[in-house]
């Protein structure tokens, strides 16, 4: 079933193309800008264009995967609902129609009078993606699709996507903010166990092509199923002192506690997926988050890749409790099939106990040993 991994990568490439298109083509970009500046905001649509781009990308991924793998239909989940309200207050279910013309007409019912924008999007939605990736083509897997379900984050770090900053200087390879932290995340997990098994992270804004000046993307994938491990990347080398990446919104307690462990190598970045990617790429050794501000769709794909590299992702609160109680055994990994009891809406899928993402278990243990001494965590 190498086909499913390739289909996830193909879907992420189409999604990344749409994300780039919305910033490149004027009729679409103006709608994004209206968003950013607040000018005209919500005058034309009752929801924002950013949300439409997100919903549309999610529906394209859902449509393409469901078509190729009917066993997945009804098991492809995402951050967004596809119900959209147009300027007349009518509810429109955004979806991929049979032809580009039909899709354009449906999009126009939300975007009216932006005909050019609706048409540009419809063409991108119906475009065929051809992958030229010999390594990926050579991956042979036998995972029954009917055992899997999918989490999609169509655009993670939407704030940075809208802001579109290109001038943020990276610190040791980690961008503190900016367009490059906007990612497409598609992860597959085992329906029964909730364990993440396939992950794709697409970076639509990896770099500008020096010749054309256009944005170029790149993607990474990983497989962790049973004893099978495949990854487009190699595990980063083990550094003696971990570099830890945190949200800019992370509390002072965590920052102060981790400072000495990192010996000054504490970094800050936007985007949950981007911070996980930094760990995957070895730019950081751990991503620590003390709050429940990430969701299943943020974590599933990066988590599968971390597992493919020999690492993982655990809930911070549960891990600290285990270590404080003297439990030195393996820690339970985050799972993706269990909603938070009693929660409603997006909160059902929040990673409530915070998280630690890592490649090398030694770094996980060093972080936990440090934070376990901090009262109140
Ligand atoms: C967000 C986004 C934010 C992140 C938050 C995610 O997803 O990645 O940047 O917060 O946890 O849920 P932070 O940047 O503080 O890590 P989205 O952009 O898809 O809402
Ligand atoms: Ca997200």
Image (cartoon, rainbow, N blue to C red):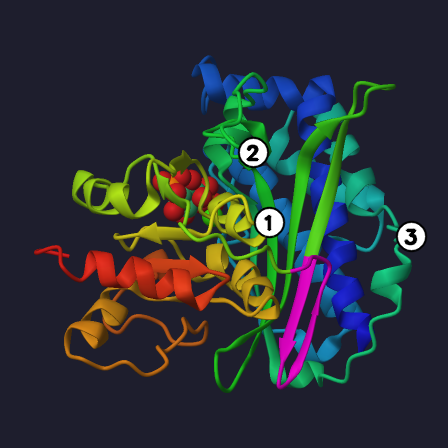
Of the pair 210 and 258, the residue shown nearer to us? 258
Left-right relation of 327 to 27: left
The local secondary structure at tag 1 comes to loop
Residue at mark 1:
281
The answer to whether residue 105 of the structure is visible from this angle is: no
Left-right relation of 343 to 336: left
Give the number of the disc on residue 132: 3
Q: How crowded is mark 1: few (under 14 residues within 10 Å), some or many (20 or more)?
A: some
Left-right relation of 345 to 274: left
Q: Give the range drawn in magenta.
A: 221-234
Give the Cα separation between the discs numbered 1 and 2. Answer: 10 Å
Give the Cα separation between the discs numbered 3 and 1. Answer: 22 Å
Give the number of the disc on residue 167: none
The local secondary structure at tag 2 comes to loop
Q: Identify the residue at image location x=45%, y=20%.
A: 41
Q: Residues within 10 Å of mark 3 (few under 14, many from 20)?
A: few
Q: Residues within 10 Å of mark 2 (few under 14, many from 20)?
A: few
Give the Cα separation between the discs numbered 3 and 2. Answer: 27 Å
Residue at mark 2:
173
């Amino acid at each position: 079933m190498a086909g499913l991994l390739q289909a996830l990568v193909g879907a992420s490439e189409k999604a990344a193309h749409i994300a780039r298109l919305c910033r490149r083509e004027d009729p679409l970009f103006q709608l994004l800008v209206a968003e950013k500046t607040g000018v005209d905001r919500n005058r034309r649509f009752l929801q924002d264009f950013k949300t439409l781009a997100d919903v549309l990308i999610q529906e394209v991924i859902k449509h393409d995967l469901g078509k190729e793998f009917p066993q997945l239909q009804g098991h492809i989940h995402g951050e967004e609902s596809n119900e959209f309200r147009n300027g007349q207050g009518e509810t429109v279910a955004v979806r991929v129609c049979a032809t580009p013309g039909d899709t354009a007409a449906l999009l126009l019912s939300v975007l009216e009078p932006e005909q050019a924008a609706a048409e540009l999007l419809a063409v991108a939605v119906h475009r065929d993606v051809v992958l030229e990736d010999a390594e990926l083509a050579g991956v042979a897997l036998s995972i029954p699709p009917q055992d899997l379900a999918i989490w999609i984050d169509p655009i993670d770090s939407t704030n940075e996507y809208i802001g579109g900053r290109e001038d943020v200087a990276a610190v040791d390879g980690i961008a503190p903010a900016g367009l490059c932290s906007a990612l497409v995340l598609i992860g597959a997990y085992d329906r029964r166990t909730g364990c993440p098994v396939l992950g794709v992270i697409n970076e639509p804004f990896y770099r500008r092509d020096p010749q054309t000046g256009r944005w170029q993307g790149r993607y990474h994938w990983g497989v962790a199923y049973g004893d099978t491990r495949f990854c487009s990347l190699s595990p980063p080398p083990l550094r003696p002192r971990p570099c830890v990446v945190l949200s800019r919104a992370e509390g002072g307690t965590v920052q102060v506690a981790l400072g000495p462990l990192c010996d000054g190598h504490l970094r800050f970045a936007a985007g949950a997926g981007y911070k996980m990617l930094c760990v995957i790429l070895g730019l950081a050794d751990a991503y620590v988050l003390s709050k429940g501000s990430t969701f299943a769709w943020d974590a599933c794909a990066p988590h599968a890749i971390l597992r493919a590299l020999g690492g993982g992702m655990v809930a911070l609160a549960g891990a600290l409790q285990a270590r404080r109680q003297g439990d030195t055994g393996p820690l339970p990994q985050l799972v993706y099939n269990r909603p938070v009891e009693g929660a409603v809406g997006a909160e059902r899928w929040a990673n409530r106990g915070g998280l630690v993402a890592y490649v090398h278990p030694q770094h996980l243990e060093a972080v936990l040993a440090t934070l376990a001494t901090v009262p109140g965590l």
